[in-house]
Amino acid sequence: MNYKHIDFKDIYADISSFNVSHSAAEYHLILHVKNRELSFEEQIEKLHEAYASLTQQELNGATSVFKRYFLSDAANQVDHLNNKIANDKRCAHSIVEQPLLDGTKVALWVYLVTDIKCRKLDNGLLEASHGNYRHLWLTGASNKASKAEYQMRLIFNDYVVQLMEEKLTLANNCIRTWIFVQDVDNNYAGVVKARNEVFATQNLTPETHFIASTGIAGRTADSHINVLFDAYAVDGISPQQIKFLTAHTHLNPTHEYGVSFERGTAVEYGDRKHIFISGTASINNQGEIEHPGNIRKQVERMWKNVEALLKEADANFNDMGQFIVYLRDMGDYEVVKKMFDNRFPDTPKVITLAPVCRPGWLVEMECMGVKEFKSTHPDF
């Protein structure tokens, strides 16, 4: 993975790039605001100006497949943002309130690919087609059922139907999910219950497999929406191309403490391997929190866990395109930022205020990467 940092007047951009000869290039771009005195409208405008400049000059005509906006105050920001992106129909937009701990109002993560065709399907999925595969993104799924449990169940049931319309299944084709939970300390248990029950109907069990995921605090502008959901699936893939990462020396199977997600997933193509690491915290292989109350030690243990998962995919941190880091306590920001900047000065990253699903976990991270890989599978 190659990394580049670019400064604009009020914005800076961190870019990771992956290039294979005669095939699609991939980029992760994270845009940050430098000038905290700008209004939200001004920050959005500056982000979009920088993004437009980069797509024309630095990103070789790559197409934006997925964008996630991290907001500080969704209730006062979502309407303006939706108006700004209303005409951008060929990209999946994820919008979540997870305040940036650098004191800015918005940051933007973009995943881009060259030579890919994107279109919005009638069922709401974003289709990105390249070669033998269709990559299908769902963002911002929600409803207003009376409880988080019911909202999660309806979201998953609707998603199963959307996949069925494309002749796909949750078990065979969904690679990654993100579940954002308002008031995670009180609502996460209901989300887990609903997911477990839906998964049991979809041949997703401890004896088969689950899906890589992050379940974390996050919300939208509407206080009645307790659960937001993003997901990524691939059409054209075979079971032989998917490897689930466990790192049993460091982590226990999630079903042992009542939840249902994979620690990580690697997807093998003919020319590359995609790696998706789920939200990972300072946990041991007995399911216990390591180093309660010690943020530095929790970060170090979290890194060891992620390293162990990456090793199973024959990968390492140098293959990662981005990091998303979630903190429970904003008072830990300076320590965590310094640790990440010292160890990973070039990797695009965002650090947000977003409590993890268990109060004793002070920090969690996820990452997504790609590395060159040769196999008999069709190329990406």
Image (cartoon, helix red, strand yellow):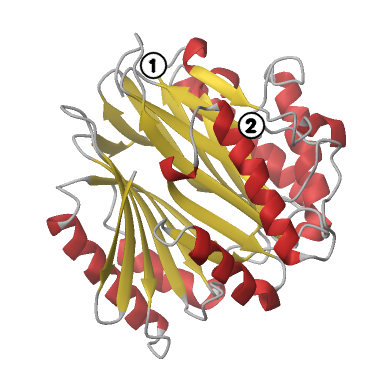
Q: Residue at left 31%, top 75%?
A: 11
The x, y position of residue 221, in whole percent, is 57, 68
**For marks 2 and 1 on the same chain, the one whose residue lies earlier in the sequence:** 2
Q: Label 2, label 1: how many angstroms apart (C-alpha)?
A: 22 Å
Q: In this view, does 31 lie above or below 206?
A: below
Q: In this view, does 303 lie above or below 249?
A: below
Q: Residue at left 75%, top 20%?
A: 205
The x, y position of residue 137, in whole percent, is 43, 38
Tag 1: amino acid: Gly
Quarter of the figure with residue 326 = bottom right
The x, y position of residue 153, in whole percent, is 71, 38
Please give left or right for residue 105 compared with residue 249 in the image: left
For label 1, the SS is loop
The x, y position of residue 201, in whole percent, is 72, 20
Tag 2: amino acid: Asn
Residue 19 versus residue 198: which sits nearer the camera?
Answer: 19
Q: Residue at left 25%, top 21%?
A: 131
Which of the numbered marks, if any, corresponds to residue 236?
A: 1
Quarter of the figure with residue 272 = top left
Question: Local crowd at mark 2 within 10 Å, few (<14), some, or many (≥20)?
Answer: some
For label 2, the SS is helix
Which of the numbered marks, if any, corresponds to residue 157?
A: 2
Most distant residue in the front direction: 342
Q: In this view, does 136 lie above or below 112?
A: above
Q: Residue at left 56%, top 69%?
A: 337
Please give left or right for residue 171 compared with residue 110 in the image: right
